[in-house]
Amino acid sequence: LVQFERERRTGDLPEIERSRTLRVATRNSAANYFVWRGQLLGFEYELAQRFAKELGLRLEVVV
């Protein structure tokens, strides 16, 4: 999982916790992230979702 932005950011955990949002970038593919019958699925999505839940954060997916 990788995050790309024009503006350089530290992305350290305290900053992420303050924002209460974990933002991840992924590709729309069967292995990574896809929508099937209205449900978000994919290995990277599920991994990021569990990580965000463990940290008590909201997950934001950028495709």
Image (cartoon, helix red, strand yellow):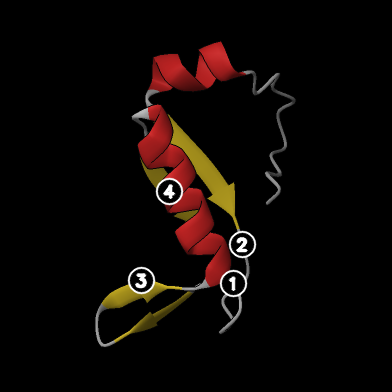
Q: Is residue 5 visible?
A: yes
- Picture layout, residue 25 above or below residue 18: below
Discs 4, 3 touching: Cβ within 8 Å: no
Residue 32 circle label: 1
Q: Amino acid at mark 4?
A: Arg
Instruction: Pinpoint residue 1: horizontal percent, then vertical percent.
Output: 68, 51
Q: CA distance from mark 2 to mark 1?
A: 7 Å
Instruction: Pinpoint residue 11: horizontal percent, then vertical percent.
Output: 65, 23
- Picture layout, residue 9 above or below residue 39: above
Residue 50 circle label: 4
Q: CA distance from mark 1 to mark 3?
A: 10 Å
How many marks the image carries: the answer is: 4
Q: CA distance from mark 1 to mark 4?
A: 14 Å
Q: Is residue 63 visible?
A: no
Q: Counting residues from the N terminus, which is met first, the one under dot 1 or under dot 4?
A: 1
Q: Counting residues from the N terminus, which is met first, the one under dot 4 or under dot 3?
A: 3
Discs 2, 1 touching: Cβ within 8 Å: yes
